[in-house]
């Protein structure tokens, strides 16, 4: 028969030795589960970002630059919510794609301005050049050169119109 003192010792032993082991095992499992959930969530966000980037690239190839920029920015924002050594190079690649899209968007606008100028719509051409500067500030020098050219063309036409009357 187990004496009362022996029973108390077994209960104490259970609470001191066995219970912490069970709790540590449960705790380890909970931590593992939380880590797995965090990794899965991170992976899901990264996959969504990758999908947005690829979608942006496809849109870019169709020369729909504004929509491409929107997709790139969506991808970048998603990646900025997670960490990892491989994330920063992805963000850098997205930033390069954004800059490229803005450049080609501005070039497209410059082409429209050229067409407008060829149709003697100089005010429209100048307006488009200012729009190009807003889209891609790095194209400001080129756009200002075009604005100067279209302004001269407009002034020549106005001068000829006045002197021929």
Image (tube, rainbow, N blue to C red):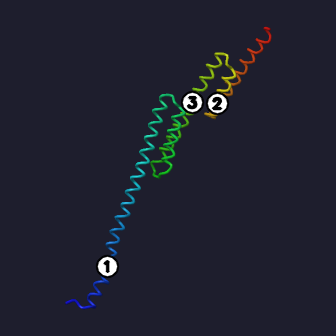
> Looking at the image, which residue is at 60% across and 23% down?
112
For this view, does 24 lie left or right of residue 76? left
Q: Position of residue 51 (x, y in %)?
A: 43, 40
* Residue with the mark numbered 1: 17
* Residue with the mark numbered 3: 105
Labelled disc at residue 141 = none
Real-space Cα distance between discs 3 and 1? 70 Å
Label 2: how many residues lie within 10 Å, few (<14), some (14-19) or many (20+)? Answer: some
Q: Earlier in the sequence, mark 1 or mark 2?
A: 1
Q: Position of residue 114 (x, y in %)?
A: 62, 20
Real-space Cα distance between discs 1 and 2? 74 Å
> Looking at the image, which residue is at 22% across and 89% down?
2
Determine whether the residue tagged by mark 1 lies in a helix, strand or loop. Answer: helix
Rendering quarter of residue 30: bottom left
Determine whether the residue tagged by mark 3 lies in a helix, strand or loop. Answer: helix
Q: Position of residue 151 (x, y in %)?
A: 72, 21
For this view, does 5 lie left or right of residue 140? left
């Amino acid at each position: 028969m187990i004496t009362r003192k022996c029973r108390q010792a077994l209960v104490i032993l259970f609470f001191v030795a066995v219970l912490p082991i069970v709790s540590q095992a449960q705790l380890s499992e909970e931590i593992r589960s939380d880590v797995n959930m965090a990794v899965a969530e991170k992976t899901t966000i990264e996959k969504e970002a990758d999908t947005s980037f690829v979608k942006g690239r496809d849109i870019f190839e169709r020369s729909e630059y504004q929509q491409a920029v929107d997709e790139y920015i969506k991808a970048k924002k998603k990646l900025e919510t997670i960490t990892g050594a491989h994330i920063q190079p992805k963000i850098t690649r997205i930033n390069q794609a954004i800059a490229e899209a803005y450049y080609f968007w501005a070039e497209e606008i410059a082409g429209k301005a050229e067409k407008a100028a060829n149709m003697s719509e100089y005010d429209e051409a100048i307006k488009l050049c200012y729009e190009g500067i807003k889209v891609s500030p790095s194209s400001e020098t080129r756009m200002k050169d075009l604005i100067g050219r279209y302004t001269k063309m407009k002034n020549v036409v106005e001068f000829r119109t006045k002197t021929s009357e």
